[in-house]
Image (spheres, helix red, strand yellow):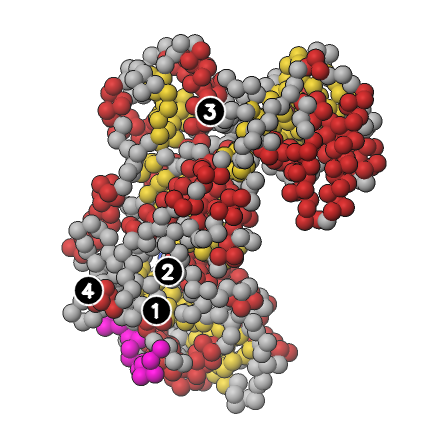
Amino acid sequence: MSSDVRFTDFKSDKQPTWCPGCGDFGTMNGMMKALAETGNDPDNTFVVAGIGCSGKIGTYMHSYALHGVHGRALPVGTGVKMARPDIEVMVAGGDGDGYSIGAGHFVHAVRRNVDMSYVVMDNRIYGLTKGQASPTSRSDFETSTTPEGPKQPPVNPLALALASGASFIAQSFASDALRHQEIIQEAIEHDGFGFVNVFSPCVTFNDVDTYDYFRDNLVDLQDEGHDPNDYEAAKEVILDSDKEYQGVMYQDENSVPYHEKHGVTEDMSEIPDGAPDDAMDLVREFY
Amino acid sequence: MAEDLNWAVGGEAGDGIDSTGKIFAQALARAGRHVFTSKDFASRIRGGYTAYKIRTSVEEVQSVVDRLDILVALTQRTIDENLDELHDGSAIIYDGERSWEAEIPDEMTAVDVPLKSLAEDAGGAIMRNIVALGAACEITDFDVEYLDEALEKRFGGKGSQIVENNKEAARLGQEYVAENYDLDHLGYSVETTDNDYVLLNGNEAIGMGAIAAGCRFYAGYPITPATSIMEYLTGRIEDYGGHVVQAEDELSAINMALGGARAGARAMTATSGAGIDLMTETFGLVATSETPLVIADVQRSGPSTGMPTKQEQGDLNMALYGGHGEVPRFVITPTSITECFWKTVEAFNLAEKYQTPVFLVSDLAMSVTEQTFPPEAFDMDDVEIDRGKLVDDDEEVDEWLDAQGHFRAHAVTDDGVSPRAIPGTADGAHMSTGLEHDELGRRTEDQDERVQQVDKRYRKVETAQEQEDWDYREFGDEDADNLIISWGSNEGALVEALEYLEEDGIDVRVISVPYIFPRPDLSEEIEAADDVIVVECNATGQFADLIEHDVLTRVKRINKYTGVRFKADELAEQITEQLSAEVPA
Ligand SMILES: Cc1ncc(C[n+]2csc(CCOP(=O)(O)OP(=O)(O)O)c2C)c(N)n1
Ligand code: SF4
């Protein structure tokens, strides 16, 4: 790990094809800066991306990376971390990717508490498929597939995480660059599953959850004197559907990441040239 | 033919049938006898008939037969279900004191043993099956010391008192029969030898092969009959620095395994039935991201939930063609329990050498059948590891950087195989994706690059076709006019069927194929034969279709899809029948 890593080292030379003004630009910049700031470099970092406009992030960043199938990024990240506890793992995707098709994996990744960070670019819409309702869309939000709105309440991803036993729950806003970066950094540094829901506006398909909307409504928990180690206080802000918060809502101080709990500490990429020395014992067991 | 003894214990699921059978099988193996076991079980945990059958001989046995000499019956149903296989000389051990009145045909020998009360005398009713084993020892003139050894192995971990009680239970059963019955006229005795055999099933062999081959990460979701691979690895792989994750579903399992593999570990997942369908989504990703991954499919009877506890070889087409788009993959089908071990080792090597998914297609019959082998059959010194083009030091990586210093993880090469850098390798950072991509792994829709990458991925198969031995195993008379072709677990029954056919003066050549893709070219063998019969446990003849496609000629087929594996005598009969039948038009 070299100390002279700059955040631009995490940038690939592919030009993003995101719409000008898309929140994902800010989200990505914060991720790259946070990775560099926490002492990582592209050769020891693995980024797993989902599918969606958000998932393209893996293409625009430079590191070891896998851009997989829709909704399954978290299991891939889990596998990478199991095999290589020495590698920094970051998983990224959208609200559809994470809370719809991947919702099952989300719940279980959270409860496993694998030591990785998970950044969800929540634009409350399906961007890549051109504007259908997502699980975080408001119940009256009109889209091509829900002309009268989804008529069902949105998922509260923070509450879902809390109920699944999360050890770190945070929310940030792509355009509040400094705070966003800080929060991602905290997620990376957290010993366990660092979950950050990022308000990352879609300027093309969502004219409700806009930059202006978030700017006007965002409440920073730091300003409120919120104590993230206080579970009850966390519960209150997470379940408060009247306000949009940013900051670290909850952090379990005693969090023990999966690999430590299960003694998964070896670099599994190194194996003997032949069968292990004592492998005949495996056969003798069947006597 | 070997002097066999065929023994079974049957009752309700939950009666401890499995462990009773296993203890007896282990005792026989310890006595240096060959053992072949089979299980009849229903898809429920409690209730429902279940039986554990053992065929044992001093000579090698590798198939089930329609014959039962000694039956431990815990229920009437056990007797009814096996009437076909029982014969005049069969002895049936049962407990007349229990609430059921056994209806046993007069020709057979009823051995009424108060299993429950003798077990209680020894320390607990739960040991009534062990009392029955003692009784069986007496009938077969089999030294109970071997049973004692098996009991020590089984219960040793639970303390010496438990072991002693079980030994006592066996002794009481033995004595009871000795005192109350004279069964010498039945003529049963089991000869012992000095041989040391190990007794294991196909799934255990796959798990053992995986550890031997350096697999350190396994992710899976429980499903019959694949689960026992995960159960084997859990608790053992940790000793080698590995780990097993029970994922939330198969979509997750295969993606976790993929993550482990991309991180540089030898990784694996295994499933069956519906699970393989769920994994199909990710096959293409494994192939296009060029990730070395071993995916085992322990076939069970389908479609849909089908018959989860029954045998079938119905997933061949799925393994070959499953998934959207066209993706190269290797499909390997072990033909015996030892092959389950060796082909697993080979699967890991092929996966890494060609950076591609490898399907290891086994089946239920192999997974639940235990068989004895000399330990040398699994000689760990013969395990070779080939990690392929894994680049690590700076120099190797440098060779594969483009002018801008980017690592060409999907470089287009003559043999189709690119260098592989795993996380932590300096300057090796790169992206891989399920999207069509260029040499750097970045998305492309450029027509030339698309064609280059598709061709490159298929070129790996061509290279492998040239460089590896896609051979087959052969039995019987090499010059015979009759050729039988089989894949997967049918081999053992076929080998034994040869003996029956020989008695009838019919010569056959048997070819048992462990590779479906790529597969050996059998055109010469087929041309040289008059009659060609393909044997498989499915209704449509999926392998026969492939063979016909390869050689452009019709073949005869023997298909069984009852849910039960082939038996040697039954196969011999069907082969004889087919030999005189017309070739399909
Ligand atoms: C199995 C599967 N189903 C559907 C799709 C099509 N699809 C691609 S992205 C997407 C939704 C993405 O929404 P979100 O995760 O919110 O990301 P965004 O594009 O808004 O960043 C869908 C449905 C797919 N790629 N795979
Ligand atoms: S469609 Fe929306 S989410 Fe996608 S790139 Fe454009 S602005 Fe961003």
Badge number at residue A285: none
Question: Is the same chain shared between marks 2 and 1?
Answer: yes
Give the CA separation, mark 2 to mark 1: 10 Å
- Chain label for disc 2: B
- Label 2 element class: loop
Q: Earlier in the sequence, mark 1 or mark 4?
A: 4
- Chain label for disc 3: B
Are the residues tagged 2 and 3 within 8 Å (C-beta)? no
Quarter of the image where the N terminus of chain A is located: bottom left
The kind of residue on which mark 3 rests is Ala
Tag 1 residue: B424
Q: Earlier in the sequence, mark 2 or mark 3?
A: 2
- Label 3 element class: helix
Quarter of the image where the C terminus of chain A is located: top right
Q: Residue at x 31, y 75 (%)?
A: A10
Tag 3 residue: B493
**Considering depth in this image, is B262 or A185 the residue closer to the camera?**
B262
Q: How far across and how far down the image is residue B110, in percent? A: 74, 18
Question: Is the same chain shared between marks 3 and 4?
Answer: yes
Tag 4 residue: B399
